[in-house]
Amino acid sequence: MPQSATYLETANGPKYLVQLCKHFAHKIVVSYTETQGECQFACGTASLEADAQGLRMAVTSVDDEGLAQAQSIIESHLARFAFRETFDALDWQRSDKAA
């Protein structure tokens, strides 16, 4: 099953986690606390973990297309919420394939 993860170093990790989860909860199944969240998209599942240093995001899907779509959803929404941060594209790392 395709999996990838990325990390955004930011002092606002918990804030962004809650914003993302609250936003997605209007349309999909979401569960979250201030430090952990899970979003069940049709294309895959995203797990979020936040602490004072940043926000870790991991995505799992049944295929590469779904993985790319879930990554794109997370990244585009995070870019909107974190518009004051200076980051380009997130560096998603595949964890399901041998290097």
Image (cartoon, grey):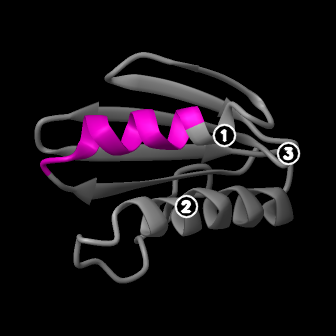
Along the horizontal axis of the image, is 27 left or right of 95? Answer: right
Instruction: Calculate the distance from the C-alpha at mark 3 to the C-alpha at mark 2.
Output: 22 Å
Up/down of 33 relative to 90, above or below: above
Q: On the image, numbered disc 2 is attached to which residue?
A: 77
Q: What is the quadrant of residue 98 in the picture?
A: bottom right
Up/down of 65 relative to 88, above or below: above
Percent coordinates x, y for residue 20 in the rendering: 51, 43
Q: Residue at x 20, y 47 (%)?
A: 12
Label 2: state its secondary structure: helix
Is residue 17 highlighted in magenta?
yes
Q: What is the quadrant of residue 88 in the picture?
A: bottom left
Percent coordinates x, y for residue 39 in the rendering: 65, 33
Q: Which residue is drawn at 45% across and 41% down?
A: 19
Q: On the image, numbered disc 1 is attached to which residue?
A: 24
Q: Are marks 1 and 3 in contact (CB under 8 Å)?
A: no
Label 3: state its secondary structure: loop
Q: Which of marks 3 and 2 is in front?
A: 2
Q: Residue at x 36, y 32 (%)?
A: 49
Q: In the image, what residue type sits under mark 3?
A: Val
Residue range of the region highlighted in magenta in the rendering: 11-22
Along the horizontal axis of the image, is 6 left or right of 43? Answer: left
Q: On the image, numbered disc 3 is attached to which residue?
A: 62
